[in-house]
Image (tube, helix red, strand yellow):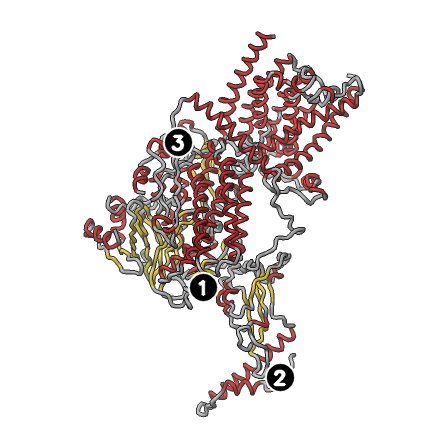
């Protein structure tokens, strides 16, 4: 160890000095240290204050600051990595598979987007701001943003939905998915009924069979 | 000294103890019957060449039908460490207390009792430590079910999503 | 006492109440600002516009409007009475404070004695508050306060004897009048070693009397939470607060009157004699007096925001083993000096 | 090292003091009163409850009651994947979450056999030392507050604010970072960050001197803390007291030196120990002063780490992160690191699955608090405040 032992046994025993000189030295040290302390506080009087008058002046936030989760749904590929990696389970994500002909654009990683994100709910009131979801997001659709005013009055206002869809459109897509699932189930049942004749491509067939036209069955 | 040397020395000092050195990654662990625990512990602390004056950690682990109590020892003087493991069955989860040898074990043992339900005989203050005194069950057991409420305080779904302000 | 005298006394009393309230508001504001700037902060900045000048007014209004909570287990009559007794103690002392040659509530010939007597009334109120709250922390605070305030009466009394000995009077007015004619005639400078020691001892001991840091152990917020007024809320709490700040001023006023030349300006020709103008003399006297006293109030705040808190036994140690011998020796030497040289 | 140790193990001042104090108490035969200090009390630094039995101002017996902040971290961890545990580990000692995460991550890395690059290690050392300074600033500042000095507390929180800003820029969090990951870091340091750390070092150095003038060597402060609640070295070791508290008792013992991790052996720094300069070795002042001096040493380490980082080439800080944590080696390990509070140990039992079979956290504050009931008898109530403040507990870690 590079540091020498700083003490010897004598230091363990409280110093025994002449009590009277101890008394006066204590008094003197007391007065001096009090005056020194007063000088320190006094020297801070004219110094510039560090207070930031918040609503009037705002401190810029760093681009990394974990303030608010935002999902850019156009870039979201429904991989669910964020949901899997979240330690507190704040994500509620529902997706509906796009029709084969439907063009939803290209994701940032170059692959075509295949899912409608019907629901992308984040419960920010539960978020622990660990940032694992943002790091897990391959397409960088989930990002941190730094709004200056984050507080809300109602806890429900922290339940964010990033799907960017109207309720009607959501219902429409969900109905379509439902119908497709039903058709698939019916086909599976039919297939189970006739096990001998196995068609070579059941999935693609079912996809085309259930919704050949872009107009779905109209919602109730 | 490394672990096997300590184990050898210990076996020499205490041949009847039945100490088994388990090869576990990355550090071996010495298994010890609970009847010998206090004597061996006192030896570990007092033997000048061992001098384990520091109980770093006392942990309770559930492994299948057994409960393990693991003692991580360290000697500040000799810079060596050693691990003891004592295995008891769940139905008979009583361990001798080592709090007379290392006083720090007192709180660790209370925690092990509170969390895992291991009783420590000879403990000076055998109470729960982290949970409330009238809490039921031992939360770290694998089969523990968390209660719905405690003294009429709901414990699940404290903040339902539609709760107003 | 004639009717006019009575009327004047009542008017003075009302005026003092107004002054105490205004002073407390200003002092609390000042304390916030002083502490804030010592700690590189700004303090209140919003309420009322310019640098939050009306923050304390708003706080007072809030305290007035707050619910007056009395604990169920409290001794209710004592609990209700205590803050007023504490306030009365510090308020009554103002009667003898000589703001100017002709601006003094009652120039009684035992002014200093009255002052010492009346200002120890506060300890009764504090004891009542601590006892009546039926709270262990409050009781601790009250007990500490009683022990501390009773002990510190002695060094205070002994150090007050120094100017009394020099002026050969107990009347506040006469005590100030012997210091007329420039700052070199002020007691603290005219009899430097004795008066300075007495001044320091009095000022420090009176910090203990007013329960200010470093002697704030009766209300030590990190130990006893708030001490004797832990159970008080609303206006009753405000009374304790008001009494504390009134006391701060009383202490500073006594130091000013006895050691720092009272209403006299540092240089004689800045004064207006009573013969020239009654009102002018009162105004300029009150100005000098208040300025000196306020400066000392600021020093008290400065100390509070610098120093840690003492422990009970150390507090007693300082009283009995430091202040007492020093003030005894001081008064002894001064008596010898007066007897031999004058 | 062992030389200085031999010297300290046999000092037994405190029990003598306590015994004489208790003898005084027994002579008086006052009526005893039980006093509940906490769970809401300004001096208990969180939700600690001390059940004091007092005789006047003298404390005869003190029983700490903990668990008010218990959230069963160990149970939660058993249901989390390995990377998901780190945010929870951060919250153990919320004043020093980098150090906590470092302890857990290093334990996992040793268990899984992961080696990280030198750059990652250096960044880890840098942030750990920064967080040590931040934690000690809180400890020292709130200790001043306990003793009744307001201003040092606010001064030190200013300094801490600079550190938190640096952490904010580095990791995105101000208090809880989740920056150190198993096998690497969340990301490399941002551009222009290291010069800011240099600026901070330059800014911070005179501030410790100012603190010493204002608080540490103030007569009232030294009187309040010197000779109070003396913890002798042997008692400290028996009770598993570690970190600055143990060093305050004069034992030159630091895991960064004794069992170096993350390349601490290559840094040049000293271990400050208590010297009893205002009383007896192991009193409250020594524990306090060790923290102040440790801040200076941490600044030294930070300086060295920054110099190294400026020389090191940027590389992929996530290179060593395993692709998947679903299959990890079987084994168990007790790994300990030196956090600002002392020895933080993680006993990790892995059965090869994606989640730990058992994760026991040996929290330094937990063991340090257990010695309180031994030290408390014979102290005044004001001394209890000084004692609790000087052992610097964080209830998030005590209760887990």
Inter-mark Cα distance, 1 to 3 = 62 Å
Q: Is residue B139 left or right of residue A66?
A: left
Q: Quadrant of the N terminus of chain D?
A: top left
Q: Nearer the viewer, mark 1 or mark 3?
A: 1
Q: Quadrant of residue C148?
A: top right
Q: Residues within 10 Å of mark 2 (few under 14, many from 20)?
A: few
Q: Secondary structure at mark 2?
A: loop
Residues at badges 2 and 3 in contact (C-beta under 8 Å)? no
Inter-mark Cα distance, 2 to 1 = 46 Å
Foreground pick, A201 / D32: A201
Relative height, residue D127 to residue D64 (above, below): below
Q: Quadrant of residue C35?
A: top right
The residue that label 2 is drawn on is A214
Both on one chain, marks 1 and 3? yes
Q: Residues within 10 Å of mark 1 (few under 14, many from 20)?
A: some
Q: Chain of mark 1?
A: D
Q: Secondary structure at mark 3?
A: helix
Return the mark for residue D316: 1
Foreground pick, D171 / D326: D171
Inter-mark Cα distance, 2 to 3 = 89 Å
The residue that label 3 is drawn on is D22
Q: Is residue D370 left or right of residue A116?
A: left
């Amino acid at each position: 160890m590079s540091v020498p032992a700083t003490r010897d046994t004598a230091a363990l025993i409280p110093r025994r000095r002449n009590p009277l000189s101890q008394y006066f030295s204590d008094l003197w040290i007391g007065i001096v240290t009090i005056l020194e302390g007063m000088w320190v506080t006094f020297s801070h009087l004219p110094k510039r204050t560090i207070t930031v008058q918040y609503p009037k002046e705002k401190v810029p936030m760093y681009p990394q600051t974990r303030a608010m989760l935002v999902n850019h749904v156009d870039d979201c590929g429904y991989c669910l990595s964020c949901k899997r990696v979240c330690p507190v389970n704040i994500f509620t994500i529902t997706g509906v598979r796009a029709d084969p002909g439907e063009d939803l654009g290209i994701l940032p990683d170059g692959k075509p987007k295949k899912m409608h994100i019907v629901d992308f709910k984040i419960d920010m009131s539960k978020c622990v701001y660990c940032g694992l979801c943002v790091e897990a997001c391959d397409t960088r659709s989930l990002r941190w943003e730094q709004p200056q005013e984050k507080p809300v009055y109602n806890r429900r206002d922290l339940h964010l939905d990033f799907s960017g869809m109207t309720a009607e459109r959501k219902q429409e897509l969900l109905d379509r998915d439902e119908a497709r699932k039903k058709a698939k189930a019916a086909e599976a049942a039919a297939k189970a009924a006739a096990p001998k004749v196995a068609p070579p491509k059941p999935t693609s067939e079912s996809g085309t069979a259930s919704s050949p036209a872009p107009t779905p069955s109209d919602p109730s | 000294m490394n672990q096997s040397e300590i184990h050898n020395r210990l076996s020499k000092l205490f041949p009847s103890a039945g100490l088994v050195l388990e090869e576990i990654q990355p550090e071996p662990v010495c298994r010890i019957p609970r009847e010998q625990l206090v004597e061996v512990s006192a030896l570990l602390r007092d033997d000048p060449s061992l001098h384990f004056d520091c109980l770093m950690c006392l942990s309770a682990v559930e492994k299948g039908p057994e409960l393990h109590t693991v003692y991580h020892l360290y000697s500040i003087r000799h810079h060596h460490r050693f691990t003891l493991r004592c295995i008891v069955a769940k139905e008979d989860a009583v361990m001798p207390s080592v709090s007379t040898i290392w006083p720090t074990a007192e709180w660790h043992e209370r925690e092990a009792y509170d969390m895992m339900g291991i009783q420590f005989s000879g403990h000076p203050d055998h109470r729960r430590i982290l949970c409330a005194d009238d809490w039921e069950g031992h939360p770290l057991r694998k089969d523990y079910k968390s209660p719905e409420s405690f003294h009429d305080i709901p414990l699940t779904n404290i903040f339902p999503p539609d709760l107003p302000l | 006492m004639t009717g006019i005298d009575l009327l004047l006394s009542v008017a003075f009393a009302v005026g003092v109440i107004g002054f105490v309230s205004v002073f407390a508001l200003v002092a609390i504001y000042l304390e916030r600002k002083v502490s804030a700037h010592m700690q590189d902060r700004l303090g209140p900045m919003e309420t009322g516009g310019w640098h939050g000048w009306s923050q304390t007014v708003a706080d007072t209004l809030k305290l007035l409007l707050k619910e007056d909570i009395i604990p169920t287990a409290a001794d209710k009559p004592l609990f209700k009475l205590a803050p007023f007794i504490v306030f009365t103690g510090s308020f009554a002392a103002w009667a003898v404070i000589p703001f100017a040659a002709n601006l003094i509530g009652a120039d009684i010939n035992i002014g200093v004695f009255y002052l010492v007597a009346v200002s120890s009334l506060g300890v009764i109120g504090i004891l009542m508050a601590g006892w009546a709250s039926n709270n262990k922390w409050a009781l601790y605070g009250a007990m500490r306060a009683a022990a501390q305030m009773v002990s510190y009466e002695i060094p205070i009394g002994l150090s007050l004897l120094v100017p009394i000995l020099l002026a050969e009077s107990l009347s506040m007015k006469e005590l100030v009048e012997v210091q007329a004619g420039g700052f070199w005639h002020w007691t603290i400078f005219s009899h430097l070693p004795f008066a300075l020691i007495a001044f320091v001892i009095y000022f420090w001991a009176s910090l203990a009397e007013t329960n200010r840091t470093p002697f704030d152990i009766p209300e030590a917020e990190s130990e006893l939470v708030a001490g004797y007024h832990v159970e008080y809320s609303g206006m009753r709490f405000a009374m304790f607060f008001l009494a504390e700040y009134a006391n701060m001023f009383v202490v500073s006023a006594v130091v000013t009157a006895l050691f720092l030349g009272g209403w006299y300006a540092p240089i004689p020709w800045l004064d207006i004699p009573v013969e020239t103008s009654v009102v002018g003399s009162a105004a300029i006297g009150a100005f000098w007096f208040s300025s000196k006293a306020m400066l000392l109030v600021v020093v008290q705040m400065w100390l509070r925001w610098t120093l840690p808190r003492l422990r009970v036994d150390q507090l007693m140690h300082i009283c009995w083993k430091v202040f007492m011998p020093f003030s005894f020796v001081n008064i002894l030497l001064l008596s010898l000096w007066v007897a031999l040289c004058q | 090292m062992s030389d200085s140790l031999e010297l300290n193990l046999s000092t037994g001042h405190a029990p003598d003091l306590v015994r004489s104090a208790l003898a005084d108490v027994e002579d008086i035969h006052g009526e005893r009163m039980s006093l509940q200090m906490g769970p809401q009390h300004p001096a208990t630094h969180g939700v600690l409850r001390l059940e004091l039995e007092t005789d006047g101002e003298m404390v005869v017996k003190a029983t700490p009651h903990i668990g008010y902040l218990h959230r069963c971290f160990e149970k939660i961890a058993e249901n989390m994947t390995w990377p998901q545990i780190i945010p929870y580990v951060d919250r153990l000692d919320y004043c020093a979450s980098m150090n906590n995460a470092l302890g857990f991550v290093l334990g996992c890395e040793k268990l899984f056999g992961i080696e990280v690059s030198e750059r990652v290690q250096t960044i880890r050392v840098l942030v750990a030392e920064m967080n040590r300074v931040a934690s000690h600033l809180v400890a020292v500042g709130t200790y001043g507050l306990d003793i009744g000095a307001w201003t040092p507390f606010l001064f030190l929180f200013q300094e801490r604010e600079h550190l938190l800003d640096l952490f904010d820029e580095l990791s995105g969090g101000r208090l809880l970072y989740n920056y150190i990951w198993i096998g690497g870091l969340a990301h490399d340091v941002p551009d222009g960050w290291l010069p800011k750390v240099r600026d901070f070092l330059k800014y911070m150095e005179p501030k410790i001197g100012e603190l010493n003038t204002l608080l540490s060597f103030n007569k009232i402060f030294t009187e309040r803390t010197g000779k109070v609640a003396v913890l002798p070295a042997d008692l400290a070791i028996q009770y598993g007291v570690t970190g600055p508290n143990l060093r305050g008792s004069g034992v030159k013992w630091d895991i960064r030196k004794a069992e170096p991790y993350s390349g601490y052996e290559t840094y040049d720094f000293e271990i400050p120990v208590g010297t009893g300069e205002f009383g007896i070795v192991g009193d409250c002042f020594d524990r306090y002063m060790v923290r102040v001096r440790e801040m200076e040493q941490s600044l030294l380490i930070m300086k060295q780490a920054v110099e190294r980082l400026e020389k090191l080439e940027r590389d992929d800080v996530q290179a060593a992160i395993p692709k998947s944590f679903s299959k990890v080696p079987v084994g168990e390990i007790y790994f300990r690191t030196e956090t600002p509070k002392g020895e933080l140990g993680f006993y990790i039992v892995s059965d090869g699955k994606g989640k730990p079979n058992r994760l026991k956290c040996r929290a330094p504050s937990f063991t340090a608090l257990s010695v309180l009931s031994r030290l408390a008898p014979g102290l005044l109530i004001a001394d209890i405040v000084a004692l609790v403040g000087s052992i610097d507990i964080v209830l998030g870690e005590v209760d887990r």
